[in-house]
Amino acid sequence: MGIIISPSILSADFMNLEQEIKSVQNSGADWIHIDVMDGHFVPNITIGVPVVKSIRKRTDMFLDVHLMIENPEKYVSVFADAGADLITFHIEACKNESKVKDVIQLIKQKNKKAGISIKPNTDVKAILPYINEVDLVLVMTVEPGFGGQEFIHECAMKIPIIRENSNSDLIIQVDGGINNLTAKICKSLGANSLVAGSYIYKSNDYKKAIENLQS
């Protein structure tokens, strides 16, 4: 499996979102990462169902939807129907083990790929019981909520622990402060998917930025 590059549209020009998505697709991006924030689970409000639905109408790219919201079980169905291909939720948004399993099951029932994410201050042990039930684990290397933050190196050390305890086909994605240098660190530790917002969308050459993350 190669490295899956998933540009985060949180850093894109929203006035020209269709063109921004086409530009990264033509530059070699594999997926499109869509950050959904509710202003409760994280201190920011971003994209909702109507935007995902609009994006789906305009692109055939794989839509990687990251739910940074409370009560994710209430929203799995609507985001699946809007066109998400992968739905990732946060373990911290679930009150107990039963709730985590319920959300995974809901995603699978919609025939979507399931992802589970872990915030910087959450012990990696919390996520281990579920990693063989999902398609992807997302390791946050910044506090979720805003783009442009600095990479937290200690968080990357969760990657090899997840890799050692998982099936070989698990996608380990990293999001937060990803650039050409931190990408190399994450890949060396076992990550095979990288989310990058500012590094790609604030660059003058999307193709070169994506190639730098892949190499």
Image (cartoon, helix red, strand yellow):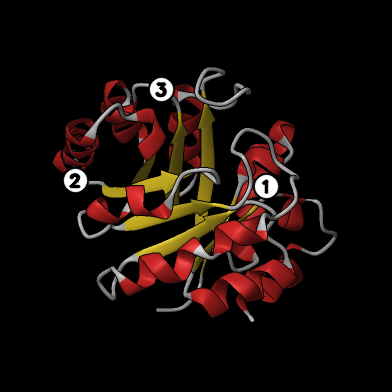
Does dot 2 land on a helix, a strand or a loop?
A: loop
Q: CA distance from mark 1 to mark 2?
A: 28 Å
User: What's the residue at 47%, 60% (across, down)?
Assistant: 173
- Who is closer to the viewer here, 40 or 76? 40
Q: Residue at x 63, y 46 (%)?
A: 142
**Residue 143's x, y, as percent?**
62, 40
Find out whether the residues at labels 1 and 2 contact each other: C-beta distance under 8 Å.
no
State yes or no: discs 3 and 1 in contact (Cβ < 8 Å): no
| Residue that badge 1 annotates | 20
Whether residue 72 is visible, yes or no, is yes
- Mark 3 lies on residue: 70
Cα–Cα gap, marks 3 and 1:
29 Å
Above or below for 25 versus 97? below
Instruction: Name the residue beneath numbered marker 2.
Output: 111
Q: Are marks 2 and 3 in contact (CB under 8 Å)?
A: no
Label 3 secondary element: loop
- Of marks 2 and 3, which one's residue comes earlier in the chain? 3
